[in-house]
Image (cartoon, grey):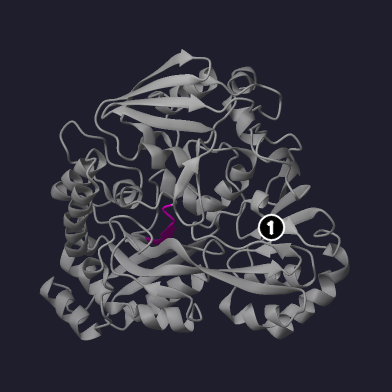
Amino acid sequence: MRKITLLVLFILGASFSAWAAGDTLVIAQGVDATTLDPVNHQETPTGNVTSNIFDNFYRRLPNGKYQPWLGEVKALDNLTWEMTVRKGVKFHDGEELNADVIKFNFDRLLNPDKPLKYSTYFKPIKSVEVVGPYKLKITTSKPFPLFLTRLTYFWVVPKKYIEDKGAAYFANHPVGTGPYKFVKWIKDQEIDLAANEDYWAGKPKIKKVVFRPIPEASSRVAELVTGGVDIITNLAPEAIDSVNASGVAEARTVPSIRNIFVELDVKGKGPLHDPKVRLALNYAVDKESIIKHVLGGNGTAVGCPLNTYMFGYDEDLCKPFPYDPAKAKKLLAEAGYPNGFSFTMGSPSGRYLNDRQVAEAVVGQLAKVGVKADLRVQEWSSYVGQILQRKIPTDAWLIGWGNAQFDADNTLFTLLYGGNVKGGPKRTVFSYFSDPQFDEYVLQAQSVVDQSKRQELYKKALERVRAGAPWIFLYQQEDIYGVNKRVKWQPRPDELIWAFDAEIVK
């Protein structure tokens, strides 16, 4: 790693040393944004860009709690909420934020003919009524205890600008109320933002922010130690020592809210349709070995879709499946596959910490119990596009989920709800699991106000997931960032990189 870094440093040093300088903060992620519409994506790298351009109605704090931001909300009864919009806030083009704009945002999210990626989070809303210039009344079809946490996903967009320019233009030339204004987007190269000097929450300390997609981990490190970028995501564990010794940058870490797992297509008729087979795969994968040798110890093995940050987590039901190849072989034999079987598995490269290497390790360990996985690695935009369109060409796929809502619902409903409840929502785009009892528990939890009762419902739901094993559960990620020493900034568990929190120390 040291030799590679020094070689790239020699080649690129002169070219990029001017990038991260003065009042400009350059952030390198493994992939580019897929859109700049803040409520029509499901990827953290995209959200890191849009969160600097837009404001949400409630803001999530680093400790997981939330606070009023563009306004305040209070419950009038179990089905009625009053929203008060903050006065004096303007969009980057001068449009005023008011109740009409907020209603436009709800109408846009709740339009059944043009659903957005975040539309599902607000389905319980029955009506939105403007009752004053800065006041609205929200009525829900059932109790909605998740409303306030969902408002952290309610990124507010301009009404007049979208009506004039159209949604497609807006998605590439965004206008928000946030701390930074959009300047330009050269796809797969850079996104440039400039400080909003009139930001209602105060003038940003950093004048310019640049997001650059750099898929190769070694290239991100080289750019960091030569001063080409200020913050890099997914710093490879083997590069930590060289970064800390560079004199320019250092590694900063935080346990992430993100879990990494291999999702299995369980809806077909092949081996993966059998829960015994899926349990066998969980026993066949040595999570601790992957964490130690592939991630450099930067992770925590998990045995369920949740982790300790999330409401609904249950320690007993989330214990990792132990590495037990003998038990895996026994389960395979009982399921009718004593000699194993073959299937295809997908993985991104550069999206998560050593994601391709993790996938390769999983493939190698499965081979030891006779299961042959044909690994197919793709670049992120194609990979995530196939997942969102339910056009995945493989039987299994490595993926991560960050759950920035800090609540079990965002994982269990979004990723596993199968649409088996009569009169309830349809299957979610991410779910290949089908368990009617699980669906009942998760839907009930969405409308129960008593938190202790919600916790009990999630416990029952986790029991169903544990038995059904629709994924190969791997680990809770430890996020590792490389950060230039001139930047005053600490990573957050939800992976948000908000430049308004950062400062360049000269």
Q: Mark 1 highlights which residue?
A: 27
**Residue found at x 68% / y 63%:** 231
Q: Quadrant of the N terminus?
A: bottom right
> Please, what is the dominant secondary structure of the magenta stretch?
strand
Q: Farthest residue in the left direction?
A: 334
Q: Which residues are magenta?
A: 397-403
The answer to whether residue 189 is visible is no
- Helix, strand or loop at disc 1? strand
**Residue found at x 38% / y 31%:** 74
Q: How many marks?
A: 1
- Whether the magenta-drawn stretch holds residue 398 is answered as yes
The answer to whether residue 181 is visible is yes
Question: Which quadrant of the view contains residue 166?
Answer: top right
The percent coordinates of residue 271 (x first, y second) are 21, 64
The percent coordinates of residue 229 (x first, y second) are 74, 62
Of residues 226 and 217, which is closer to you in this image? 226
Q: Please indicate whether residue 88 sits to the left or right of residue 8 in the image.
A: left
